[in-house]
């Protein structure tokens, strides 16, 4: 029996509404861990980005005056935006350089609190926007892989810190980047990396899609999200208007998926701007890579490196169980659980995250390091501040 035009129109309207809700939620989730979409054509890209991004102040929502700004080419020719901070009187040698690696659909400004504190404490800090994020160039989508991100980190290190000790700090996909780097460049990791902090991240081995909707619905969104948002983006101008109409939904989704405690509205808007400043085709390209991630073999590259693992107890995207698995694979690592916080914990509870990083930086070296590692073995510390 043929449906009436009225019923068919209503069905399409309901489908668009449901799809828009899923699309917005998926994109926000992508900003913290996973999401999906695809854009066809430069014109659609320009229009979709116009709503959220009008310049550097909009992409880097927490600006910081860097001492040096570099354009670093990667192994496939894409150029990364890199910022270097050198404290007054800094000289190579006594302290390691700290390299901050941000998460998916975020950018280097997500480290604003830790960056300030580290520089004030006298540490040289290197921050950069990962490929297709922030102010870095957009490259071929087939190169949006965790393996390539590990290569990119090597390019940043070679360009900014060719000698001396390093401490690598990664959040979410940034932690995966560090694991990939450690697995590929084991000699460099062993000889130069004095510590690695893996924050709200996972080595994979199982689906990373964690939307709290149940396993079946999580998998459906993982499979259908890129296709739906791709169709949305191909409708010229629709993505921008959808965003404009859904600002309240965006803030709700950022609060739900990124944070464990209620955050100020202004901060939620800033984080949403950072998230949606990322191209939709980039989000879609990384989705299957994140969902199918398994860098557990790369963890062998960190077995001789002091490792800090930080988890938020209310992280719904990479729940603490992922950090527990990392700690099991790296038995000398220190695991810090921060109660009550969600996925973007470096913005939600900056002091606790910064304190944990300083603890890693202050760990003993040389002959005392083995004894310290033995004391930390199997320890789980709950941050109560």
Image: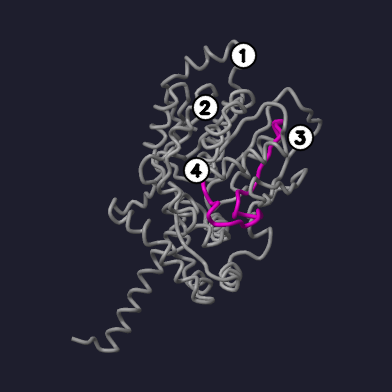
Residue 49's disc number: none
Task: Indicate the secondary structure of the residue bearing disc 3.
Answer: loop
Pointer 4 or 1: first along the chain = 4
Of circles 2 and 4, the one toward us is: 2
Instruction: Say if 279 sits above or below 112 in the image.
Output: below
Residue that numbered label 4 is attached to: 172
Between the residue at mark 4 and the residue at mark 3, the CA separation in whole angstroms equals 27 Å
The residue pinned by badge 1 equals: 366
- C-alpha span from label 2 to label 4: 17 Å
Q: Main secondary structure of the magenta part?
A: loop
Task: Give the farthest residue toward the right.
Answer: 89
Upstream in sequence: badge 2 or badge 4: 4
Is residue 135 highlighted in magenta? yes
According to the picture, the residue beneath numbered tag 3 turns out to be 87
Q: Which residue is mark 2?
A: 302
Spatial separation of the CA atoms under disc 3 and disc 2: 29 Å
- Mark 3 neighbour density, 10 Å: few (under 14) some (14–19) many (20 or more): some
Mark 1 vs 3, N-terminal side: 3
How dense is the environment of label 1, judged by Cα within 10 Å: few (below 14), some, or many (20 and up)?
A: few
């Amino acid at each position: 029996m043929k449906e009436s035009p009225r019923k068919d129109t209503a069905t399409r309207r309901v489908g668009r509404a449901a799809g828009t809700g899923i699309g917005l939620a998926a994109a926000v989730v992508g900003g913290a861990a996973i999401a999906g979409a695809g854009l066809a054509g430069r014109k659609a890209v320009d229009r979709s980005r116009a709503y959220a991004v009008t310049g550097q102040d909009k992409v880097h929502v927490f600006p910081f005056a860097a001492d040096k700004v570099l354009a670093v080419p990667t192994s496939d020719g894409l150029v990364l935006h890199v910022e270097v901070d050198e404290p007054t009187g800094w000289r190579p040698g006594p302290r390691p350089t700290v390299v901050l690696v941000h998460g998916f659909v975020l950018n280097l400004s997500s480290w604003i609190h830790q960056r300030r504190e580290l520089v004030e404490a006298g540490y040289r800090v290197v921050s950069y926007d990962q490929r297709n994020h922030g102010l870095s160039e957009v490259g071929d989508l087939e190169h949006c892989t965790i393996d390539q991100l590990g290569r990119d980190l090597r390019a940043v290190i070679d360009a900014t810190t060719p000698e001396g000790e390093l401490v690598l700090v990664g959040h979410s996909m940034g932690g995966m980047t560090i694991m990939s780097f450690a697995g590929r460049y084991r000699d460099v990791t062993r000889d130069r990396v004095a510590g690695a902090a893996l924050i709200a991240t996972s080595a994979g081995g199982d689906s990373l899609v964690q939307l709290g909707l149940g396993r079946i619905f999580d998998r459906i969104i993982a499979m259908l999200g890129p296709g739906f948002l791709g169709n949305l983006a191909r409708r010229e101008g629709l993505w921008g208007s959808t965003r404009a109409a859904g600002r309240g939904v965006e803030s709700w989704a950022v609060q739900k998926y990124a944070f464990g405690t209620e955050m100020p509205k202004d901060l939620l808007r800033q984080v949403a701007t950072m998230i949606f400043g990322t191209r939709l085709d980039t989000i879609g390209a990384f989705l299957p890579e994140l969902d199918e991630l398994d860098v557990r073999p790369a963890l062998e590259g960190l077995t001789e490196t002091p490792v800090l693992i930080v988890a938020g107890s209310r992280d719904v995207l990479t729940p603490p169980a992922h950090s527990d698995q990392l700690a099991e694979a790296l038995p000398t690592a220190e695991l810090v659980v921060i109660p009550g916080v969600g996925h973007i914990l470096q913005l939600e509870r900056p002091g606790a995250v910064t304190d944990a990083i300083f603890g890693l930086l202050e760990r003993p070296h040389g002959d005392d390091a083995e004894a310290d590692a033995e004391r930390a073995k199997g320890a789980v510390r709950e941050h109560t501040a």
